[in-house]
Each structure stands twice: as C-alpha cells, then as structure tokens.
Image (cartoon, rainbow, N blue to C red):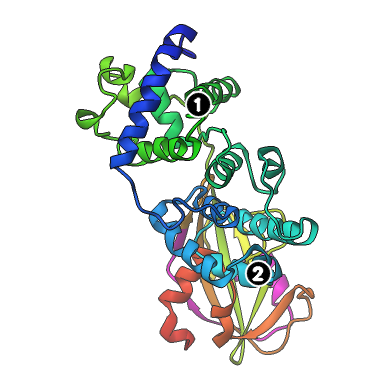
Amino acid sequence: MRGLPHLRYLCSMSKKMTRQLLKWFASHHRPMPWKGEKNPYLIWLSEIILQQTRVAQGLPYFEKFKETYPTINDLAAAPEDEVFKLWEGLGYYSRARNLHATAKNISTNMGGKFPDQYEEILKLKGVGPYTAAAIASFAYELPYAVLDGNVFRVLSRYFGIHTPIDSTAGKKEFAKLAQQLLSKKHPADYNQAIMDFGATQCIPKNPECKNCPFQKDCVAYREDLIDQLPVKEKKLKKRTRHFQYLIFNIDEQVWIHKRTEKDIWQGLYDFPLIETNALLDQKMLWKNKSFLELVEGQKVTIDRVSRPFSQQLTHQKIHGVFFEIQLSQLPDNFSENWKLISRTNLPDYAFPRIIDLYLQDNSLYLNF
C-alpha cells in the first residue's frame, strides 16, 4: 500500500491490531518512573527530557529534576543558570529554556495548575502535538493518539505505507491512522503500548519479527519490506564548524561569557572563541587577525594547546581546539557580557559538551 490503507481494510484491521497490542502490553510492561504517573507536571517533565534523548540517558535527569524541583512552582522559581546546569549533558538546550519558560508561565498565569485540555496543553511553549497527546492521555485519559518515531515505524511496517513520514502528507495520513487505531477506553495504555512495542520489538534494525504477534498481518514482513519502511524524503544537511577556544588566564582567574546570540548553545557559557574554516595551530593563531585584535597591547604567553575535541550535533559537527593563554592585565576590548571568575568555580557553570570534555581531560591541570 503506497498511502493510507483502504478504509474497509483499515476498519477490519484496526480493532484486531488494537486488541493484540493491548494484550502484548499486558505481558511486556517496561517499568519506568513516569509510567502510570497521573501528575501532569511529572509527565510533561519526562516527555520534554525524552525528546531526542534515549530513555537510558534521560532517566537520571528525570530523577534529578524531580528531586530538585518537586512541583512546577519550584521549577519556575529556579534561576535559569541552575536549570541549565542540571540539564548539562543532555543537549538540545532549547528544551531546557522552554521547560523553564513554561513553568514560569504556568506558575504566574495559571496559578500553578497544569492545563487539563489538549488544546490548552498544545499552546504551551515547547509542546507539540506528540507531547500534548502524551500528557492528555497519560494524565487525563483523553483520547488523543501519540505519534513519535516508534509509532511511525510500527504503523508504516504493519500497513505497508510508503508515504514519507517527514512529509506534510505523511504526517497527516499517519496522524489520522493513529487516531483511528487508538483505544478510546484505554488511551493511556494504548499509547504507551505502541511506543513500547516500537522501542523494544519493532526496532529500526533487526526487529524481533520471529516473535512478533503481528507477523501474519504485517505487510512489511510479508513482502520483505522491513528495511525499506518507514520512508523519509528529506536528508539532513550537515555542517562542519571549527572553533578556536581562547582560555584567557589572569593569575587563577579565567574569562567566560553566556552565549546570547541566535546560534547553538544559547544560554550556555563558553570561552572567547574564533571560528575559522579549519582548526589552527599555535603558529597560525599568531597570524589570525581576530586574535591579534583581542590581545592588542597585551603581553601574551600561550602556555598550552590542546588536542582536537569534537561534538556531534543533529545538523552540525563541531571541532575545537583550546589555547591556554596568560594575559598580563585585564583586556580593554572585552564587552560587559564577559566575566572573570576563579578557575575553581568553572564546575558551577553549564558549558557545551565539547568544553566539558576539555575540562575533564585537564582536571589535574585545572586544579578542581
């Protein structure tokens, strides 16, 4: 089937699939701290953390946030830097920024009460149709079907749908199909079941087809299309960037600043940096115009140059090298956004992972 299954076929198969899926779920329950949770704040917290994050990685962060901020009002009252520090290592920091903004909005404008209607949940910053459906069904048993990567995969394989899942038409088709299959009596169990099934059995590569309860009815299995479904039409355009981090030291203090520009890692701290087309060595750095402007009039000593470090983002790969530089005096040409802190206080600030890798690699040198 190249598009949405024929209505008659869909009606005949939907009840059977829903029934089989709920039966499978009853004996394949994956225990998670947020499963069965009815507190919408904690459900929302878990869903935001798990966006673009594996469960194994997100689990300890959920526990940390739950312990540190037991209520949405606690999260709303927290300083942004504290929230970012707790989030450090999860990546996609826009999630943390939206999490904090939404908590403040609910605390200030909604009396600390989480919305209990799908349409109102969907209006929250950082909440899309999937997250809204998850919160609505898990917290309030409202009949809204979730549609994430796992669900796309299960449905495309079971029904043999070739419509690209990342196309506008595909999103509409799969959303309609997912809603058709949803158990109206048990929306929370059904949504959790189909996501768990995709995460543990109908996985992207080498799924457990031999032990699959849907084997007889699965179009992809029957027609040998497992490796071809689901279909995506868009390929990510990836960009490579090269950062020269300049760690300017004055005695035991170092310059840092918060990234405020509209770029990656907004809201995190970093060191002064120069972006180039390729990584520079020490000799090349001394010829770089931006570097010379920064250190103009200074007595400068480059004490150490690191090995290259890398960090892979969704659309970008960042390569970086770190120069430990001694300055003779405070620079005149640093803006007020920069701050001079003790090196021993560096662990108190949230940095991009590439900087954390460098700091950890040099922990003895940095005397933390």
Amino acid type, residue under disc 2 in the picture? Asp
Quarter holding the N terminus is top left
In this rendering, position of residue 274 left or right of residue 192: right
> Where is residue 15 shown, x and y percent of the image?
41, 20
Residue 187 lies in the magenta stretch:
no
Q: What residue range appears in magenta?
A: 284-310
How crowded pointer 2 is (Cα within 10 Å; few <14, some 14-19, many 20+) is rated as some
Judging by the rendered image, the residue that carries numbered circle 2 is 74
Residue appearing at x 44%, y 51% in the figure: 35
Question: Residue at position x 41%, y 85% from top?
Answer: 364
Q: Is residue 229 visible?
A: no
Q: CA distance from mark 2 to mark 1?
A: 36 Å
What residue is pinned by disc 1? 178
Query: Relative to 267, does residue 344 appear above or below in the rendering?
Result: below
Q: Classify 231 as above or below 297.
A: above
Which numbered disc, 2 or 1, marks the residue that appears first in the sequence? 2
Q: Residue 204: horizontal and vertical position, in percent?
A: 34, 35
Which residue is pictured at 51% across the width and 29% down the height? 184
Q: Is residue 261 left or right of residue 311?
A: right
Left or right, residue 100 beside residue 215: right
